[in-house]
Structure formats: structure tokens, C-alpha cells
Image (cartoon, grey):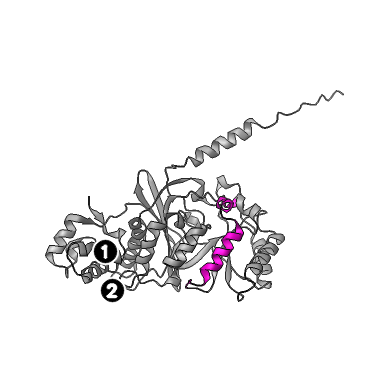
């Protein structure tokens, strides 16, 4: 069976070449051909020896994911749906801005965390993506965009300047595949992204946050969404395993090796659920308490307008409520931003990525059974005899 070269970071590719008796610089050449030049076959790699190209042809492959669909938003956002086999498809989103191009990458087909406000989590989990499947999303988007926007350039500029692991899935529950993918993104012989420009988003897998801090500290975004355990456990079920106090301590530990001097907290604004003045007060107290021995600005709060989907039973907080919430935090010295929604006309905004997933967890079936049980056990109506 052929090996997929997109599964290897440079260190892994070097070991592979050494097994064939090749010098380490051959791995670097091969790595550049794949990632910097977007080579799609080994015959293109003209500075590699013919014998090596033959060996690559016989033993290796560059596995491309079929593109199921491509959608373009009026704001320039592009969403691709990639087929990852067995009836599963994942989504990748490119968000262009004046000073950057951000790619939102998926790490799993579906998600096992099951956050109440997330369309991906609602459909359950099928499987982890491989390193190659994560890297391919960046490989495809980068070279597609170069061809589209710089077709005549002999030395095209990099189109993707930032990568956020905020697509489908919980990246830290797929850690072994995530780590080499991050190293490919950061390598100067591949995409040359700085650690500050690669962000891993997590719902709070505390042990893996500590591992990431040691193995490959990139920017960290934590899905907080509530200021207390009782509320957060209803929105982010993982909180029952890693409650807020443990999560905050892990965030503080992450600060030392992190490329940025702050951690970003994501907070999805849900009408009447987590957007009230008392929630803002609790958030302020939470941040002050854990940051009492630190400088101000050890964290940033990113308020995210909720993107409703029917099954959630939730509504987006009104703009005035979001502004009030933001002002309360800012007045208390908490660095706060309101995320601008992008790509919502093509269901590419935060929380909307759903792809197509064959749910191995049976989440949807269990949810339907739970609803049926609730209906069956509803008390029967009492009929009052109006004649008395």
C-alpha cells in the first residue's frame, strides 16, 4: 500500500528518505515541491534524481480529497466541501480580509463534544481526520487561490496568512494527527506560518492543552460560552469532565510557552441564556480572580453572534444586547471584541459547519429517543368538570 506524503511533517519525511538511503536535503526538496510549489505528480520534481522519482512513484502518493462542492459568499468567503470517504464530508472555509487571508480547517468528521449551539456537534461524530486530510485542506486552498488570483505570477505570494483549527471537530481530541499537521503549517519549507498566526480552538480538553503547550505552542482559543459551571455544562458537555476552574488553570499554564501573551476566550451570544448583565458580572469576576497575579490583558474575550439552526432551540442575542454586554466588559478592563460574521449566506459562519457525517456515536438517534421518552412521560391533562 502506498504511503500518503501529506501525512508527513519534514522530520517524518526525512526519516522516510533515510530508509531509502537518501540524504536529508532530498526530503527538504521533496517537501518544498509538495507544499510550496503544489506539485501534483513526481515527474514535476525536476531536481530529484530519476531513480528517486521512480521510487516515489512506486511507493508513495499525494492523496487528494474529492471536492464535493464550492460555495462563494457575497463577502468573498469561500467554502469547500471535501469527501473523506464512507459517506462523510468535511468543510473548509477561506475568509479574505484586507490585511490577511484566513483558512478555517476541520479536524474531524463531525464532533463528539456536542455543544448545544454548534451545528457540527448536533450531528454527532464519525471519525478523526488523518494528518494528510488536515494538511490537504490547506494545500488545496493555497494553490487554488494562487491559480485564481495570481495566474500569471512566476513567484506568487502566499494567499493564506492565518490558519484557525476552528472547522468541524475538536482538534485536541485528534492530537496525534494534529501535531504533525501543525508542524507542516509552521515549517519554512512548507507554508511558513508563524506560531502567532496558527490558532487551535478547543472546548477545553485540559490534558491536551498542557501537551500542546510543550509540543507545539501555537495561539490558543478556548470556547468558554458561560461564566459558571452550571450553565456551561448545559452548553458545553465537556465541562462536566473539565470544569471551569481546571480549564482556567490550564489557560494560565499555557501563557508561558504561548506565542501570544494572551489566551482568547470565545463566547457565543445566546439570547436570554448567557447574555444578561449578571453573566457579564460573573465573567468579569472570573477573569479578575484567575488573573489577579498577572498583568491586565492576559486574556481577550471574543463575543460571537450565534448563527441559529432549527435543532438548537436557541436564538441570537440582539445587537443592542451584545453591545451592552461588550461595554460592561470593556468598562471593567476586559479586552473585548465582537466578531464580524462572515459567510453566513453560504452557512460558512462560526458554528454553521455541518458537512455530511455518518454518525458513529448514534447521537441523533439518542436525541430522538430522549425526546420520545419526554413526550411519553408528560402528565396527562386533567379535565375539569365545569358544571361544578
Q: Nearer the viewer, mark 1 or mark 2?
A: 1
Residue drawn at the location 68% of the way across and 71% of the way down: 332
Identify residue for label 1: 13
Query: Is residue 311 shown above or below 260?
Result: above
Precedes in sequence: disc 1 or disc 2: 1
Query: Is residue 376 shown above or below 289?
Result: above
SS for callout 2: loop
**CA separation in Å, label 1 and label 2:** 29 Å
Along the line of sight, which residue is nearer the eye, 229 or 335? 229
Residue drawn at the location 53% of the way across and 58% of the way down: 204
Along the line of sight, which residue is nearer the eye, 365 or 222? 222
The answer to which quarter of the image holds residue 171 is: bottom left
Q: Is residue 52 visible?
A: yes
Q: What x and y, as percent, mark residue 280?
A: 68, 63
SS for callout 1: helix
Q: Is residue 75 visible?
A: no
Magenta residues, start to end: 235-259
Q: Quadrant of the C terminus?
A: top right
In this picture, residue 229 sits left or right of residue 55:
right
Identify residue for label 2: 153
Amino acid at each position: 500500500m502506498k504511503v500518503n506524503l501529506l501525512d508527513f511533517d519534514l522530520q517524518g519525511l526525512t526519516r522516510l528518505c533515510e530508509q531509502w538511503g537518501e540524504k536529508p536535503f532530498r526530503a527538504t526538496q521533496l517537501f518544498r515541491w509538495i507544499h510550496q510549489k503544489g506539485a501534483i505528480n513526481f515527474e514535476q520534481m525536476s531536481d530529484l534524481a530519476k531513480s528517486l522519482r521512480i521510487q516515489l512513484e512506486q511507493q508513495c502518493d499525494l492523496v487528494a480529497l474529492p471536492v464535493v462542492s464550492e460555495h462563494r459568499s457575497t463577502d468573498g468567503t469561500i467554502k469547500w466541501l471535501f469527501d473523506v470517504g464512507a459517506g462523510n464530508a468535511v468543510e473548509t472555509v477561506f475568509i479574505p480580509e484586507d490585511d490577511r487571508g484566513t483558512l478555517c480547517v476541520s479536524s474531524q468528521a463531525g464532533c463528539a463534544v456536542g455543544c448545544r449551539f454548534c451545528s457540527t456537534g448536533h450531528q454527532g461524530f464519525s471519525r478523526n481526520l488523518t494528518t494528510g486530510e488536515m494538511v490537504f485542506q490547506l494545500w488545496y486552498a493555497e494553490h487554488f487561490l494562487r491559480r485564481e488570483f495570481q495566474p500569471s505570477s512566476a513567484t506568487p505570494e502566499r494567499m493564506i496568512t492565518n490558519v484557525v483549527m476552528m472547522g468541524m471537530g475538536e482538534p485536541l481530541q485528534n492530537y496525534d494527527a494534529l501535531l504533525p499537521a501543525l508542524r507542516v503549517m509552521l515549517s519554512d519549507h512548507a507554508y511558513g506560518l508563524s506560531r502567532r498566526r496558527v490558532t487551535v480552538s478547543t472546548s477545553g480538553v485540559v490534558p491536551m492543552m498542557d501537551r500542546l503547550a510543550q509540543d507545539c505552542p501555537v495561539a490558543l482559543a478556548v470556547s468558554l460560552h458561560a461564566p459558571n459551571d452550571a450553565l456551561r455544562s448545559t452548553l458545553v458537555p465537556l465541562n462536566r469532565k473539565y470544569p471551569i476552574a481546571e480549564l482556567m488553570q490550564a489557560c494560565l499554564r499555557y501563557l508561558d510557552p504561548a506565542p501570544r501573551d494572551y489566551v482568547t476566550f470565545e463566547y457565543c451570544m445566546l439570547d436570554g441564556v448567557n447574555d444578561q448583565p449578571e453573566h457579564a458580572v460573573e465573567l468579569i469576576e472570573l477573569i479578575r480572580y484567575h488573573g489577579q497575579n498577572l498583568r491586565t490583558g492576559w486574556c481577550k474575550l471574543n463575543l460571537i453572534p450565534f448563527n441559529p439552526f432549527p435543532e438548537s432551540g436557541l436564538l441570537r442575542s440582539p445587537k443592542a444586547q451584545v453591545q451592552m454586554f461588550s461595554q460592561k466588559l470593556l468598562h471593567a478592563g476586559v479586552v473585548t471584541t465582537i466578531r464580524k460574521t462572515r459567510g453566513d449566506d453560504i452557512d460558512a459562519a462560526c458554528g454553521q459547519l455541518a458537512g455530511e457525517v455518518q454518525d458513529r456515536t448514534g447521537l441523533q438517534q439518542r436525541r430522538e429517543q430522549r425526546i420520545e421518552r419526554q413526550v411519553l412521560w408528560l402528565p396527562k391533562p386533567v379535565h375539569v368538570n365545569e358544571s361544578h
